[in-house]
Amino acid sequence: MDKVTIPMISMRGVGKSYGSHQVLHDFSLDVMPGEVVSLIGPSGSGKTTALRCANFLETYQQGEVRIRGALLGYEEGPAGQRQPASERSIAEVRSPLAMVFQQFNLWPHLDVIDNICLPLTVAHRVPRDKAEARAAQALERVGLSAKGKAFPHQLSGGQQQRVGIARALAVKPQAMLLDEPTSALDPELVDEVLSVILSLAADGMTMVMVTHEMGFAARVSDRVVFMEAGRVVESGPPKTLFENPETDRLRAFLKTWRQRNGLSVGTAQQELPA
Ligand SMILES: Nc1ncnc2c1ncn2[C@@H]1O[C@H](COP(=O)(O)OP(=O)(O)OP(=O)(O)O)[C@@H](O)[C@H]1O
Ligand SMILES: [Mg+2]
């Protein structure tokens, strides 16, 4: 019999509102172990919200999010009704995930080692000496072994984001969620971060990444999901989405993107990096 693989992350029919403003509608996404999925779409389409619901940094009201099969954010009662889960249960269910933020979210008053160790010692209860060993290993992985004693303001944006990635890696996640990891960076610093992400993908890390870097999405992703107004409009392998979009909405989105980036509106191939 075939081995049944449970999705690392399964979002089914997720609905999310801020007050009366519904920002996710019936949002579904399954991410299998080892898969790299990119979320693309116009500003305000709900990409960040979808990512934040995937690890319950935001609550959702309809549908369900499961991490390796376990319901995240709610507990199911005997009659199938659900109630909010305890903080402890939420932390446990989301523990296979780590997040990388657009604005790095490093603590400015802590050096690099402490920035990486704090979530380990506090949230994951790793003893300090082991946390430091993991921090050193994670820094090596992103090419920043020499920067452990530096403070965030002493680092370039690209280095700060690599520390953000090291901090996520140090918790030994089974999947990483990345929200526009390069969009706060000067253009010349983007590549050093993208190459770290590419190498994680090559190592088989499961990733869900929100990005405006279409060329990179095409190169790194197994699947691309195009969102608009809180819904999935199209999803599939990058070659299909970028070269043969099915919907006018995705065609229009790609056209705008190419024009903005000074690329010809012709073949999608032209935007793909070598
Ligand atoms: N904390 C919040 N309170 C109220 N509304 C919010 C909040 N966060 C997001 N929204 C709204 O939800 C919608 C989706 O926002 P979201 O940040 O998920 O979009 P996005 O696709 O990530 O956009 P961008 O590409 O600009 O980052 C937007 O209409 C936004 O104004
Ligand atoms: Mg966003």
Image: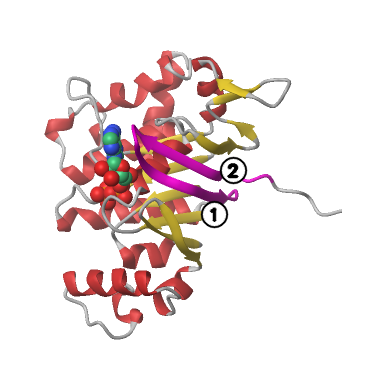
Colour style of the rendered protein structure: secondary structure
Amino acid type of the residue that numbered disc 2 sits on in the rendered structure: Met
| Position of 163 relative to 267 (above/below) | above
Q: Is residue 31 magenta?
A: yes
Task: Name the residue beneath numbered marker 2.
Answer: 8
Q: Nearer the viewer, residue 208 or 141?
A: 208
Task: Say which residue appears at 46% left-offset and 13% top-offset.
Answer: 127
Q: Nearer the viewer, residue 26 or 187?
A: 26
| Position of 12 relative to 154 (above/below) | below
x, y (%) of residue 38?
42, 56
Q: Quadrant of residue 269?
A: bottom left
Q: Residues within 10 Å of mark 2 (few under 14, many from 20)?
A: many
Amino acid type of the residue that numbered disc 1 sits on in the rendered structure: Glu
x, y (%) of residue 257?
24, 69
Q: Determine contact: label 2, label 1, CB under 8 Å.
A: yes
| Position of 107 relative to 155 (above/below) | above
- Any part of residue 181 in sight: no
The disc, 2 or 1, on the residue closer to the chain's N-terminal end is 2
What residue span does the magenta drawing correspond to? 6-33
x, y (%) of residue 262?
16, 75
| Position of 221 relative to 120 (above/below) | below
Describe the element under mark 2 as helix, strand or loop.
Answer: loop
Q: Nearer the viewer, residue 128 or 20?
A: 20
Task: Name the residue beneath numbered marker 1.
Answer: 35
Judged left or right of residue 146, residue 268 is right
Q: Is residue 120 magenta?
A: no
Q: Quadrant of residue 142?
A: top left
